[in-house]
Image: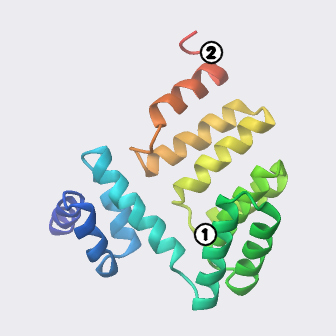
Amino acid sequence: MASRRALIAALVLLPASALAQRRRELSVDQLFEALKLAPTDEAARAVEAQIWQAWLQQGSPAVQLLMRRGMRNLHARALDDALEDFDAVIALAPEMAEGWNKRATVYFLRGEHDNAARDIAETLAREPRHFGALAGLSQVHEARGDLVAALRAYEAALAIHPRLPGAEDRIKELRRKALGEGI
């Protein structure tokens, strides 16, 4: 256990380029351990990027192609096209958490909060440590007006990724809205 912790601690100190080269040798579990131990925001961002990369590179070449196309469509706000791409990802690789997460994002952007929440639940069933899905769930709850649930979901994301970008402001705002703190 101590040697494993030392390995993980050493990983978070690697430059981002070196971490990217080592990612193929690392399990997602090790990356999550490194994420929790990241001593700086920069180190956390490097580990986070490797986790996202691992999630996106799952599945067959066809699934990866659909994911890339869906991401391009999502970034271009071609939401109908992105939805078709992520539907196809889920049909071909229903075990792939990131397909469900990306489709949840499309649903959220379309204002379809029930569908987004359903797909987030599917994401978390496949990858309970999906900090992005938990942060998304926070936004869904906030959009629905359930500020306490939004705060809880975001706190769950922070338990997994303590250096989530923008976390300090987000948690402060949610606490103010949900609990009246800091008024």
167 displayed left or right of 103: left
Q: Position of residue 66 (x, y in %)?
A: 66, 80
In the image, residue 144 sits, relative to residue 24, either above or below, namely above
* Quarter occupied by residue 140: top right
Q: Is residue 88 visible?
A: yes
Mark 2 residue crowding within 10 angstroms, few (<14) / some (14–19) / many (20+): few
Q: Position of residue 21 (x, y in %)?
A: 27, 76
Instruction: Identify residue for label 2.
Output: 180
Q: Amino acid at mark 1?
A: Glu
Q: Quadrant of the N terminus?
A: bottom left
Q: Residue at x 28, y 53 (%)?
A: 43
**Gap between marks 2 and 1 measured at Cα:** 34 Å
Q: How is the image coloured?
A: rainbow
Instruction: Identify residue for label 1.
Output: 98
Q: Position of residue 169 (x, y in %)?
A: 50, 29
Q: Secondary structure at mark 1?
A: helix
Q: Amino acid at mark 2?
A: Gly
Q: Secondary structure at mark 2?
A: loop
In the image, residue 98 sits, relative to residue 178, either above or below, namely below
Query: From this viewpoint, which residue is outermost toward the front?
Result: 76
Callout count: 2
23 displayed left or right of 52: left
Q: Position of residue 157 (x, y in %)?
A: 52, 47
Q: Nearer the viewer, mark 2 or mark 1?
A: 1
